[in-house]
Amino acid sequence: MNTFWNRLNSTEKEVLRECGGDLLARGVVGLGLGMASVGVISRWWGRPRKVSTYAGPVVSPGLRLATWLVMCTAGFYAGAVSGLPKSLEKIQSLPDSELAHSVRVATDDWKEKQRIEEEMREHRKQAKEALERKVIARDDPSV
């Protein structure tokens, strides 16, 4: 069976393992931050108020669990994604690597797409400004 992993050389496999470990570590840190933020928010939300005896809203266990799951997942995802640029640089720095070439091609395509979209935004902005100038000139002949 010719899987993707079997087609990689040992250097590529080692770099991918290292990048995976880095991303996992960053994700775990993000998970911890997500858990801490839920703890801080729930502590603040449920604390007693000095003015009245009202201690805050009653939150169902299902909603509390859903909040924990969403915040922890978001924290893990944000932490892992924050390490992607570093991992891409590691992969792209591999010499004579088909994987590095594929990543370079993909990132170059993405950068080209971003450049084209930026040019299109600029053209739209210029066209809108030109149209506004025409409308002002049509409405006010002294301009």
Image (cartoon, rainbow, N blue to C red):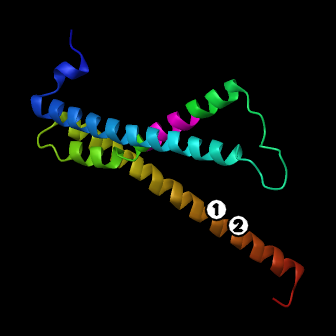
Q: Which residues are magenta?
A: 70-78
> SS of the residue at dot 2?
helix
* Magenta stretch, main secondary structure class: helix
Location of residue 131 (image quadrant): bottom right
Check whether the beta carbons of the residues at disc 2 and disc 1 lie within 8 A of each other.
yes
Residue farthest bottom in this picture:
142
Q: Residue at x 41, y 47 (%)?
A: 110
Residue farthest top in this picture:
1
**Image: 139 above or below 21:** below
Dot 1 surroundings within 10 Å: few (below 14), some, or many (20 or more)?
A: few
Residue ID for mark 1: 124
Residue 32 as seen in the image, left or right of residue 100: right
Confirm whether the magenta stretch covers residue 53: no
Q: Residue at x 67, y 66 (%)?
A: 127
> SS of the residue at dot 1?
helix
Residue 76 as seen in the image, left or right of residue 121: left
Any mark on residue 64, and which? none
* Quadrant location, the N terminus: top left
Q: Residue 14, percent across and down?
A: 15, 33
Query: Callout 2, which amino acid?
Result: Lys
Dot 2 surroundings within 10 Å: few (below 14), some, or many (20 or more)?
A: few
Q: Residue 62, percent across and down?
A: 68, 24
Q: Residue at x 17, y 19 (%)?
A: 6
Query: Callout 1, which amino acid?
Result: Arg
Confirm whether the magenta stretch covers residue 76: yes
Residue 122 as seen in the image, left or right of residue 103: right
Residue 60 as seen in the image, left or right of residue 80: right
Residue ID for mark 2: 128
**Image: 11 above or below 82:** above
